[in-house]
Each structure stands twice: as C-alpha cells, then as structure tokens.
C-alpha cells in the first residue's frame, strides 16, 4: 500500500500535490516516512488504506466437472468447492444463488494471489464427481489442501470465509518462547487450545504433535514451547501436552506421554465438546450440530454490556463447577456477533435480546446452511438474574433432559 504525499501549506493548511503529479512512497508493507523530507507536522493521506474490496467484474469461480477437476487440484494450492443442489428456475432461487456466488467471487478476488481457487459442484449434474471427491452435504463448502479435505462449518460471508482460509496458510503449531507470548496465550479464553513442551522442532514427539494439529487446523489452536522457563511456568514436563477447555483456568493433562499422532487426535475428538462454548461465525454449524440428544442450553449475553458481562461471568463460574459433567453443554451466543439474526431470534423465542437470556432449545435440524436461521419447534424458557437461579435452572434442565421430562 502506498500513501500519497501531502505537504503543509504556508498558513498551516494542507496543500495537495498538483493533479497528475502524485508523489508516492516506495511500495513496501509499511511505508516509512522520511522526517527530513516531509518535515515536522507533515500529513499523509491514507484513504486507500481503508479501501474495502468490491467485485471487479472478473469471473474467477468456475464449474468443476469430470474433465477439469484434476487440473484444478494441481493448479491451486487450496481449492474451495461449494457443493450445491441444482438451482431452481424461480426468481428467488436464482437470486439466492447469485448472492452466494458473489460471496465466493469476492473471496476468490481477495485471495487470488495466495493460490486459492473456487468452484461449484452441482449435486445432480456432477453426482459422480461429488462421490469421488467425498462431497455429501448440499450447501457445504469443502476445502482441499494437499491430502486434507476440510469442511467449512461457518457463516458463508466473504469476511468470515477469507479469515478462515488465511488461517489455513499459517503454521499448524505456534511456538511460544517468551513471557509476552505466554501472556498472549493466557488471554485466549473462549477457544480450545493445546500446548506441549518439546526439545525442539526435530523432536519426533514434536512432529507427532504437529501432525495432530493439522487435523484440526484452523479451528483448534495448538501451541508448543522449547523453552524450559516457559514450560516451568506452565508446569509442563518434557514431551507433555496440556488441553485447555474454553473458559477453564486449569488444563487437563493428556495422559500417557509421549504420544503418537493418533493418540492426540483421539484425545482431542473425545474432549472437544466443552461445558461452555461460544457460538462463533467461523464454526457456528459445527458447534450447533454438536448437541446433546437434539438439545442445547443456550445463553444470550452481550459481553460488552455490563449486565451481559456479569451474566457471562456467572455462566463461566457455573461451567467451571460442572466441568466434569459430560451431560452438560451450554452454548453462549453474543448477539453482537450475529446482527442479522437478532430480530429473528427475538421473534421466534419471544425474548428481548437487550437483556441476558437463558433457556433450552430443540436444535434438531435447527440451522439451515442456506439461510443461517434457527428452524423448527423451538421453545425458549427464561427468567434468570441471580447466580442461584442460573445454577438451579441449569441443574434442573440437565436432569430433565436426561430422563426426557423436559419438553421443548
């Protein structure tokens, strides 16, 4: 990004460069200002720094078929395929598909220089190809990177998708070797995270850890340290791995070190349903579909709101006290993360999302990937302010869900 040079005028105003004679700084990641040339008080125009991309009209998303799929897999470092049902001839279906297409076109445009490709696979016309590639859920976006196939379980919005895909380009394991990096690690609260202590990058145990991380990238964060001081602060022994559940202060030690790749993968799969989880745009469908017998205890609370913050802190405490209960799973939704769903949720649940709310929702087939809405006969029961009320409600709901007494 280059910034236009603007010099101060005689009277202290701003005199722009003459038309057609725009002086630019070198095209570097960060343009350095030369103090001697610009002088004190000089201003630099930076409008272009916030120039959000818009579709440039170039078609980049293509139809994948039996003839071109091998070439596409070779051409792109990462290939993203939307597996969709045949597009109807009615106006609504056509418009919906065009909106989806524009999301992918914008993502393809932004990521073009990063080696990403985007395509469509029609579930009827390309049924044989879909079966060959392992595509089985209409409306899903499948990502092929090397030998891995990753299903994107998030909101199909350009910004959410691009962020998810860029995370795929990062190393599967982040190394922590300083106090500041450790502080950053400690601040990650609402996500699953694992950290291990190893001799170095050449260690066979670290390589097994790294290979396990690739199975969950970018949804679950893996960290490692080779520093004895950092390991001591984390109470980690050599070749040991700790698993942190969201919102929990104390980790779970992965037993029986050292571990194979398969053992680590199995452990994460077994423990990844947390007592309290935050619904996030990048993996909302995975979280929502990971229910207990079609039921979720759902809490709505705005983290930036004083009442919502207090409510959330109580939820965290309740989750910590019940972390060993495998039959308890609470999903926290911050309405600010899903502004397009606020009025819809208020309508179907008959609640006011300006206040913290908690209740039980029947989520069987509850989220439609095509419209990101809660569906079905969902009943939301709520009336909670004090911690004792919340604890009583959650305890009662869990017991009722187990014996089938709670009707949603």
Image (cartoon, helix red, strand yellow):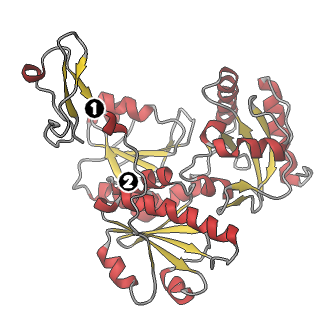
Looking at the image, which is closer to me, 12 or 198? 12
Taking the spot 43% from the left edge, 70% from the top edge, the residue there is: 61
x and y percentages locating residue 88 in the rendered image: 67, 77
x and y percentages locating residue 147 in the rendered image: 37, 73
- Whether 160 is drawn above or below 152: the answer is above
Taking the spot 64% from the left edge, 41% from the top edge, the residue there is: 339
Looking at the image, which is closer to me, 277 or 75? 75
Instruction: Please tell me how many numbered marks the rendered image carries.
Output: 2
Asked whether, in this view, residue 81 is left or right of residue 68, the answer is right
Q: Earlier in the sequence, mark 1 or mark 2?
A: 2
Asked if residue 398 shows in the view, the reply is: no
Instruction: Identify the disc placed on residue 324.
Output: none
Which class describes the residues within 10 Å of circle 2: few (<14), some (14-19), or many (20+)? few
Looking at the image, which is closer to me, 257 or 342? 342
Asked whether, in this view, residue 110 is left or right of residue 102, the answer is left
Quarter of the image containing the N terminus? top left
Instruction: Identify the disc placed on residue 178.
Output: 1
- Whether 228 is drawn above or below 341: the answer is above
Query: Which residue appears farthest toward the left when viewing the image?
Result: 36
Which class describes the residues within 10 Å of circle 1: few (<14), some (14-19), or many (20+)? few
**Secondary structure under badge 2?**
helix
Taking the spot 50% from the left edge, 75% from the top edge, the residue there is: 120
Asked if the residue at tag 2 contacts the one at tag 1, i.e. Cβ–Cβ closer than 8 Å, the answer is no
**Secondary structure under badge 1?**
loop
Measured in 3D between alpha carbons, the distance from the residue under mark 1 to the one under mark 2, in whole angstroms, is 25 Å
x and y percentages locating residue 111 in the rendered image: 35, 58
Marks 1, 2: nearer the viewer: 2
- Whether 207 is drawn above or below 93: the answer is above
Taking the spot 57% from the left edge, 68% from the top edge, the residue there is: 140
Instruction: Identify the disc placed on residue 166.
Output: 2
x and y percentages locating residue 153 in the rendered image: 56, 59
Asked whether, in this view, residue 165 is left or right of residue 335, the answer is left
């Amino acid at each position: 990004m280059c910034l236009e040079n603007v010099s101060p005028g005689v009277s202290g105003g701003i005199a722009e460069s003459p038309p057609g004679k725009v002086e630019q700084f070198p095209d570097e990641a960060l343009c350095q200002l030369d103090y001697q040339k610009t002088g004190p008080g000089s201003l630099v125009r930076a409008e272009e720094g916030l120039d959000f991309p818009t579709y440039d009209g170039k078609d980049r998303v293509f139809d994948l078929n039996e003839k071109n799929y091998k070439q596409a897999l070779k051409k792109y470092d990462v290939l993203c395929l939307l597996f969709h049902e045949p597009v109807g001839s009615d106006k609504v279906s056509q418009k919906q598909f065009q909106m989806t297409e524009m999301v992918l076109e914008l993502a393809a445009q932004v990521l073009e220089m990063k080696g990403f490709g985007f395509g469509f696979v029609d579930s009827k016309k390309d049924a044989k190809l879909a079966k060959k590639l392992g595509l089985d859920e209409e409306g899903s976006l499948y990502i092929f990177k090397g030998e891995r196939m990753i299903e994107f379980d998030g909101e199909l919005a350009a910004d959410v998708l691009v962020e998810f895909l860029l995370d795929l380009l990062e190393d599967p394991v982040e190394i922590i070797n300083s106090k500041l990096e450790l502080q950053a690690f400690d601040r990650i609260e609402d996500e699953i995270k694992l950290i291990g202590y190893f001799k170095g990058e050449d260690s066979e145990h670290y390589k097994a850890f790294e290979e396990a991380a690739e199975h969950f990238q970018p949804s679950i964060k893996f960290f490692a340290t080779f520093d004895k001081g950092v390991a001591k602060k984390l109470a980690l022994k050599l070749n040991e791995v700790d698993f942190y559940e969201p919102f929990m202060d104390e980790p779970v030690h992965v037993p029986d070190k050292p571990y194979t790749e398969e053992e680590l993968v199995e452990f994460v799969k077994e423990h990844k349903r947390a007592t309290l989880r935050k619904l996030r745009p990048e993996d909302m469908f995975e979280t929502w579909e990971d229910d207990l017998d079609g039921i979720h205890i759902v809490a709505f609370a705005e983290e930036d709101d004083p009442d919502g913050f207090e409510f959330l802190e109580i939820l965290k405490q309740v989750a910590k006290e019940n972390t060993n209960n495998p039959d308890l799973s609470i999903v926290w939704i911050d309405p600010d993360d899903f502004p397009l769903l606020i009025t819809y949720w208020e309508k179907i649940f008959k609640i006011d999302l300006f206040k913290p709310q908690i209740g039980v929702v029947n989520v069987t087939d509850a989220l439609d990937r095509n419209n990101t809405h809660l569906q079905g006969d969902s009943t939301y029961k709520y009336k909670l302010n004090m911690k004792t009320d919340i604890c009583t409600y959650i305890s009662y709901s869990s017991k009722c869900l187990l014996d089938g007494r709670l009707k949603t």
